[in-house]
Each structure stands twice: as C-alpha cells, then as structure tokens.
Amino acid sequence: MAKRTPVISISSYGIYSHWDEKSKALPKIREFTQIIPAKEDIEFGFTVNIKKAKGELLTFCIHHPGVVNKKGQILAPFDGEVYVRSNDWDFYLGDTIQLHCPINGLESNLGKWHMVMEMQGKVIAEKTFTVMANDADQFWKKRGF
C-alpha cells in the first residue's frame, strides 16, 4: 500500500489573540503581518493545517535574535515535537514578547525570529518575523540618521 503524502498549508500568520496552552482552542488571528511591534505580551506566529498525516512526528523550532533570561543569559532556540493528532489538524507555532531582563529586555527581542516546522526530516512550513521598536528614534535610525 502506498504511503499517503501529507498536505500542509499555512492558514494564517501574524499577530494573534492571547494563546491559552491549556485550552484546545487555537488563538485567533488579529492581523496578518510579518512585522511585529516590540511590545510586551504581543503574541505572534503562524498556524498550519496538516492533512493525511495522523501519527506523524512534527518537530518545530523558534530561532530568536538573542532573547535574554532574568540572569542576562541568551536563551537557546526553543524547540519541541508533537505527534499529528488527526487527519485534518491545525497547529499553532508562536511566541510572546516578554521583558525578562530589566537591563536590555526589549532590545534583546528586536530582530528576526525564524519559526520552522519539519516532518519526516523535511521543512514543511516556515516564517520569519521581524520584531521592531515602535518609536520615532528607531524610525529615523533605520533611515541612516
């Protein structure tokens, strides 16, 4: 019997409502964007729909731009794995901006956040988000002033 080929599509990406990991419900999309304002508690990421892959192992990783913990140490990329739960399954991969370090908490969140999902050793979905300061100084700094 031939192995079924999974069908994967990105359903949405950008800024979401707060995600409650204890709930079965996924967060709701608020704005489609890859530019994320650097404000505490902003939830961002993407949702994929996976069909014909029940029981397959899905691995994921979030590469962040050097986010620091409360001790001022740079956190390693966040990764994990989960088994696909049904033959028509939605999965959300995202993160929230948190100001762990009072010294440079916001600055450590600025930059590119690369989120990637793999199945059977192949990348099935990925998105890169840019977290940017939302103030006038950052606006002019990007323009060379």
Image (spheres, grey):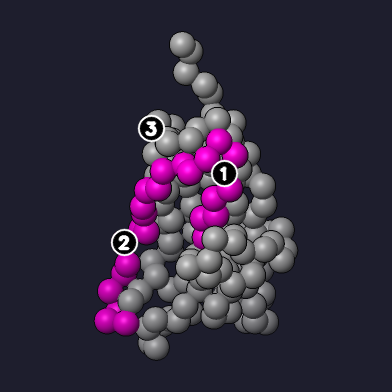
Query: Do the residues under discs 3 and 2 have CB atoms within 8 angstroms?
Result: no
Residue 110 appears anywhere in the view: no
Q: Which amino acid does label 3 sit on?
A: Gly
Q: Distance between the residues labelled 3 and 2?
A: 21 Å
What residue sits 43% from the left and 73% below the top?
A: 108
Element at label 3: loop
Q: Which of label 1 and label 2 is nearer to you?
A: 1
Query: 59 above or below 94?
Result: above
Residue topped by disc 3: 121
Q: Which of label 3 and label 2 is nearer to you?
A: 3
Asked if residue 89 is among those painted magenta in the image, a careful observer would answer yes
Element at label 1: strand
Residue topped by disc 2: 76
Nearest to N terminus: mark 3 or mark 2: 2
Q: Which of label 1 and label 3 is nearer to you?
A: 1
Q: Residue furthest bottom?
A: 102
